[in-house]
Image: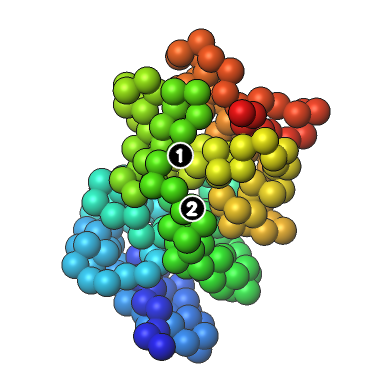
Amino acid sequence: MKLKRILIVEDEKKIARFLELELKYEGYEVEIANDGREGLKKALEGKVDLIVLDIMLPKLSGIEVCRRLRNQSQIPIIMLTAKDDVTDKVLGLDIGADDYMTKPFAIEELLARIRVNIKKNQNHDKKVNEEVLEHKGLKLYKENYKVEYNGEEIELTKKEFQLLGYLMINKNIVLSRDKILENVWGYDYFGETNLIDVYVRYLRSKIDQKYNIDIIKTVREISYIIRK
């Protein structure tokens, strides 16, 4: 079996080296970049299965690296930052990151998130048998990350797209916040459930409110559903 390849983009060389040793011990191939420009170049040049990306980087910030990568690639990205604020987490996720960790962190948790995100990325297409998901004029094209309502394209971030897709796949099923976190974010038992409410508001503003329709419904203030 081919080893999974992790790219670490981190300017603190001691942290980068520590992560390299831990990941190699776990059986991963590892590449390191110490600034944003080098990280972006390596991410686009080589076959990478996941990127661990620091936000505070010289030459090009982690936010900008993530933004540029998302124009060309859907490689799973776990962002690292010294800040611990929900707003910062939402910003990182909103530009296309798959996960987010605050320094300092336990290496066991990072390893768990790496495993979850690699597996989720591998199984993403297997979860959906249909090429296009449809609901009341809303169409979601899973292969090219495209969403339309009555023929008009709707711009969504990667995480908004994944959340909408998960809700549409599970039409008529009441989905708790924990269940959504586990299947869309891959947080399993760790994570912040209020991120779900934030992203549901994003979807409602771009779909329900814009087109005056009622797609995503709240159930007992603890879960969400799309009904046929």
Instruction: Kindly identify the residue that appears in the image at 47 percent across and 61 percent down.
Output: 126
Q: Is residue 166 above or below residue 35?
A: above
Q: Is 30 displayed left or right of 223 in the figure?
A: left
Q: Name the residue under label 1.
A: 133
Residue 125 lies, with reference to residue 119, above or below; the image says above
Side (left or right) of 33 relative to 209: left
Residue 22 image offset from top left, x and y in percent: 51, 82
The three-letter code of the residue at mark 2 reads Val
* Amino acid type assigned to the residue bearing label 1 in the image: Leu
The colour scheme used here is rainbow
Towards the viewer: 32 or 137: 137
Name the quadrant containing residue 14: bottom left
Q: Which residue is drawn at 34% across and 49% down?
A: 143
Look at the numbered disc 1 and give the secondary structure of its residue.
strand
Report the front residue among 228 and 127.
Answer: 228
Question: Residue placed farthest to the top in the image?
Answer: 212
Is there CB contact under 8 Å for labels 2 and 1?
A: yes
Residue 137 in view (yes/no):
yes
- Residue drawn at point x = 46 percent, y = 72 percent: 15
Q: Quadrant of the N terminus?
A: bottom left
Location of mark 2 (residue): 128
Q: Is residue 189 above or below residue 24?
A: above
Q: 165 or 121, which is in the foreground?
A: 165
**In this orientation, does residue 95 appear?**
no
- Badge 2: how crowded within 10 Å, few (<14), some, or many (20+)? some
Q: Nearer the viewer, residue 143 or 12?
A: 143
Q: In the picture, residue 11 is in which quadrant? A: bottom left
Q: Which of marks 2 and 1 is nearer the N terminus?
A: 2
Please provide percent x and percent y for residue 27: 47, 87
Element type at mark 2: loop
x and y percent of residue 135 in the render? 50, 29
